[in-house]
Image (cartoon, helix red, strand yellow):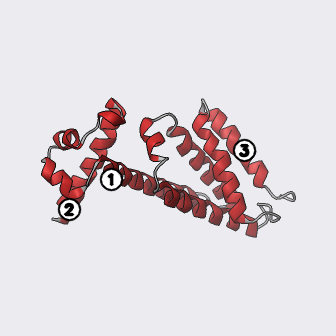
């Protein structure tokens, strides 16, 4: 039973995101989602009260995927400085990939985004703290403040036209957090 519920929920989230991508946010209705998912409207309303709730759930799943991706990237690199650079590059790449989508734009205005940003901030802060502990990151600014700096600076990747430009942005950001003695 639980597996079926998860499958219906996941199918609903995937279908809704695909509908928004194809037809735009305003064209997506609960009826259309139910029809495309292959479930009844009454069943859909048992899972979600409205389209916005589906989009928020999709975004929460999406952010969890980003955090898993950042965790994987962090785990693939041995040296602290390499881990930091890899995490910042992965974060910037994710920002770049979301550029210009109507779904991303609408969801990044939602109230739930504060929690998502907080989770990403904390993750990056912890990686910065590791790097600071071994002298790779400046210590005259707290890891918390540096995490704000990094997330804001790398958020600009969403406006970059190429992966090369995103890479340059990561390098500038790394230079900004580097310890003067490193």
* 85, 101: nearer the viewer: 101
Outermost residue on the right side: it is 181
Task: Say what secondary structure mark 2 lies in.
Answer: helix
Location of mark 3 (residue):
171
Residue 96 percent across, percent down from the top left: 55, 39
Residue at point 64% right, 33% down?
A: 164
Q: Position of residue 170 (x, y in %)?
A: 68, 44
**Mark 2, mark 1: which one is toward the viewer?**
1
Q: Quadrant of residue 81?
A: bottom right
Q: Which mark is drawn over residue 53? A: 1
Q: Position of residue 55 (x, y in %)?
A: 35, 48
Q: Earlier in the sequence, mark 2 or mark 1?
A: 2
Marks 2 and 3, how far apart at CA: 44 Å
Disc 2 crowd rating (10 Å Cα; few below 14, some 14-19, many 20+) is few
Up the image or down, 57 lies above or below 167; here it is: below
The percent position of residue 92, horizontal first and vertical second, equals 60, 45
* Residue 3 badge: 2
Dot 3: what SS?
A: helix
Q: Cβ–Cβ below 8 Å for labels 2 and 1? A: no
Q: Residues within 10 Å of mark 3 (few under 14, many from 20)?
A: some
Query: Which of the image's four quarters has the C terminus?
Result: bottom right
- The nearer-to-camera label among 1 and 3 is 1
Residue 79 found in image quarter: bottom right
Q: Closer to the N terminus: mark 1 or mark 3?
A: 1
Front residue of 139 and 23: 23
């Amino acid at each position: 039973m639980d597996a079926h519920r998860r499958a219906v929920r996941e199918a609903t989230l995937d279908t809704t995101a695909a509908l928004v991508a194809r037809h735009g946010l305003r064209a997506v209705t609960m009826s259309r989602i139910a029809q495309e998912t292959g479930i009844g409207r009454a069943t859909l309303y048992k899972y979600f009260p409205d389209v916005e709730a589906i989009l928020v759930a999709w975004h929460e799943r999406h952010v969890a995927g980003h955090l898993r991706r950042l965790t994987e990237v962090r785990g693939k690199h041995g040296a602290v400085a390499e881990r930091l650079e890899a995490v910042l590059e992965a974060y910037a790449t994710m920002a770049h990939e979301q550029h210009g989508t109507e779904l991303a734009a609408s969801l990044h205005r939602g109230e739930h985004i504060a929690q998502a940003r907080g989770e990403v901030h904390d993750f990056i802060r912890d990686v910065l703290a590791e790097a600071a502990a071994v002298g790779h990151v400046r210590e005259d600014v707290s890891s918390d403040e540096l995490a704000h700096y990094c997330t804001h600076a790398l958020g600009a990747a969403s406006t970059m036209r190429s992966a090369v430009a995103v890479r340059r942005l990561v390098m500038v950001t790394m230079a900004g957090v580097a310890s003067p003695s490193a």
